[in-house]
Amino acid sequence: MELMRLIVTGTVGAGKSTLVRSVSEIEVVDTDRQTTDKTSSVKEKTTIALDFGRLNFGPDMAVHLYGTPGHARFDFMWDLLIQRAHAYILLVAADRPGDFRQARQLLAFMEQRVQIPVVIGLTHTDCPGAWSKKDVAIALGYANKIKRPPIVIVNPAEKASVVQALITLVNQFNSKKSAAFSKKRSKAA
């Protein structure tokens, strides 16, 4: 059975823990604790280490989902989790432009450590003041549509929505893997 390790990362309150919980076929392992800082205005609990869930993608593939903490003070966990990952999804709350800078920093952090497929998942798109895909992409530094990773709208609380986002991520991984294999074969020939 093929095992795929996917990271679910993003800013505080973007929906990482909710996403892992909505699709996991096992009881989610979490490290949520009561918030004690300004985060309490967004949510009651926050992840301090990781969330872990598992999803079977057919009889031949299992997906391990690792949700990261959103706070930058836990970036050592980002570093630990991303090292063995196959791909990751960055969740961004489209209604909180004040978080876009941190999301961009998180992307840079991950890209400095690994070159793996990424999908950007926009959450909270149904909230007042939510930005469009295009505007969020530009805010994250992806003005060039060709160099931009896929951006999907995802509702972390809806299993079908999450599965669609994960399928996009798995497809990104498979197409990168295919391209790398083709490149390797052409060099050998």
Image: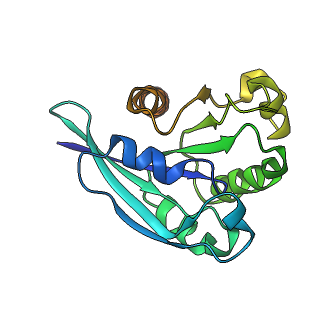
Q: Quadrant of the C terminus?
A: top left
One can see residue 86 in this view: no
Instruction: Name the side, left or right, on which 125 lies relative to 135.
Output: left
Residue placed at 48% from the left, 33% from the top? 169
The residue at 48%/54% (across/down) is 17
User: Picture coordinates of residue 166 (x, y %)?
Assistant: 43, 33
In the figure, is residue 115 to the left or right of 137?
Answer: left
Q: 151 or 130: nearer the eye? A: 130
Q: Position of residue 103 (x, y in %)?
A: 73, 51
Q: Is residue 8 left or right of residue 26?
A: right
Location of residue 37 (image quadrant): bottom right
Q: Which residue is located at x 49 percent, y 32 percent?
A: 176
The residue lying at 78 percent from left, 51 percent from top is 99
Q: Quadrant where the N terminus lies?
A: top left
Q: Position of residue 141 (x, y in %)?
A: 83, 39
Q: Nearer the viewer, residue 18 or 64?
A: 18
Residue 16 visible here? yes
Residue 116 x %, y %:
54, 45
Q: In the rendered image of this protein, does residue 164 appear above or below residue 157?
A: above
